[in-house]
Amino acid sequence: MTAREGPWATVYATTGPPDEAATTRRELTWQELCHSLEDQGADAPTVDAVRRALERSVPDAGPRAVALFAAEGRVALECRLARDPGRPEASWSVLPRLTPLLGLAGQEPACLVARVDRSGGDFELYDVGRPTAAGGVQGQDWPIHRASAGDWSVKHFDAAVENTWEHNASLIAEELGRAFEASGAELVVLAGGARECHAVRDRLPPELREVTTVSGHGGRAAGADSDQLAADIEAARLDHAARRTERLLDRFRAGRNASDRPGAAVEGVPDVAEAAQQHRIDTLLLRGTGPDLHREVWVGEEPDQVAPRRSDVQQLGAERPSPARADDALLLSTAAAGGEAVVLPGDGAADGTPAGGVGALLRWPRSDRE
């Protein structure tokens, strides 16, 4: 999707439950979305591809929110959304409508959950959609329970129990480290008894320990306080995302105001577009309420051909310039160059977010290379 293939059909919708009562309502919604695309000028093969994808997206159980991106008679990308988009929307435009995807897909990081007890641990990855199994480990299962008497033999047995606990905690921590690296997660939640969880956490490498929290709920037993554990996982993900966003904003404020590194951060569509042309955007910052997000820019055939004026983008080599939304053009250009994008909270420059709602952290300041 980083190459200019459009025009693009973009659909955000919720499928609803797979029961008969919802079938008629769902079919009417699909018809309205497809008619909307046709009215906006979408070609019949692309509309048919969208219709077929919507029909296939009905889940086995419960509602499912999806985003579809289609062009030239095929669906190029189908994304499961973490949040309900509300009213279904369909658009036909030069570029795919990507910006809503940032918020609806969820900016909360993937989280590796380890349900542990004295004998081992089971790992699950929480990202968009249902959690998926991510491995686990089974340690020694004897001896793991203390005796009740107090003579010498019992004390010796209890020492063996302690050794088993320590061995298993080390084993879980070692395997958890490997699973974390393989999963792509950004944080870990340990669920189970307080002693067992803290024993595992204490044995993790320092860098992993820093992103690990302990939940006082859940465990390996089936149905162990699962609702409260889910709330703890969500809270940990939200907190991690908020701290990450604040760190990005700190970097943006420092880069925007630094006299020794001018251009380490830029704001406003013209300056951000110039950085996109030069592949200098490390992180694109978009404030959802910013007035410049829907500002018109001109784009060419390549993602880095983006500029505020038609003549500017022609000078970049564009043979068929077209108008597009600034947020979608800059997001597509950033993704094509391997950068990241974040939706920021806030209402304006007074809170330190970019003026107009569009800013960027740069890979190198302009003054370093020019």
Image (cartoon, rainbow, N blue to C red):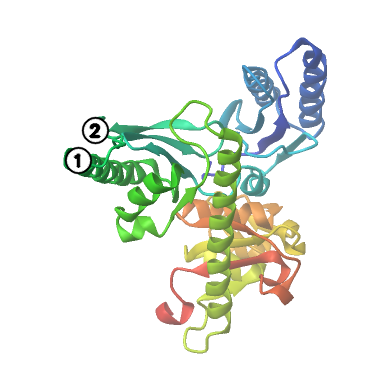
Query: Within 10 angstroms of label 1, few (less than 14), some, or many (20 or more) residues?
Result: some
Q: Is residue 31 visible?
A: yes
Left or right: where does residue 105 sit relative to residue 198? right
Residue type for callout 1: Ala
Query: Within 10 angstroms of label 2, few (less than 14), some, or many (20 or more) residues?
Result: some
Furthest residue in direction bottom, as rendered: 259
Q: Nearer the viewer, residue 191 or 82?
A: 191
Q: Is residue 304 visible?
A: no
Write down the quadrant of residue 357 in the picture: bottom right
- Residues at marks 1 and 2 touching, judged by CB atoms closer than 8 Å: yes
Q: CA distance from mark 1 to mark 2?
A: 7 Å
User: Residue 54, percent across and down?
Assistant: 67, 22
Residue identified by numbered label 2: 143
Q: How many marks?
A: 2
Q: Which mark is residue 51?
A: none
Q: Nearer the viewer, residue 248 or 196?
A: 196
User: Residue 212, percent across and down?
Assistant: 43, 53
User: Residue 273, percent across and down?
Assistant: 59, 65
User: Residue 58, percent across and down?
Assistant: 66, 19
**What quarter of the picture does the C terminus occupy?**
bottom left
Residue identified by numbered label 1: 160
Left or right: where does residue 55 sit relative to residue 337? right
For the point 69% across and 21% down, which residue is it? 51
Write down the quadrant of residue 193 in the picture: top left
Q: Is residue 154 above or below residue 52?
A: below
Write down the quadrant of residue 49 in the picture: top right
Furthest residue in direction top, as rendered: 20
Q: Secondary structure at mark 2?
A: loop
Mark 1 vs 2, N-terminal side: 2
Q: Is residue 351 above or below residue 40?
A: below
For the point 45% across and 54% down, which residue is it? 338
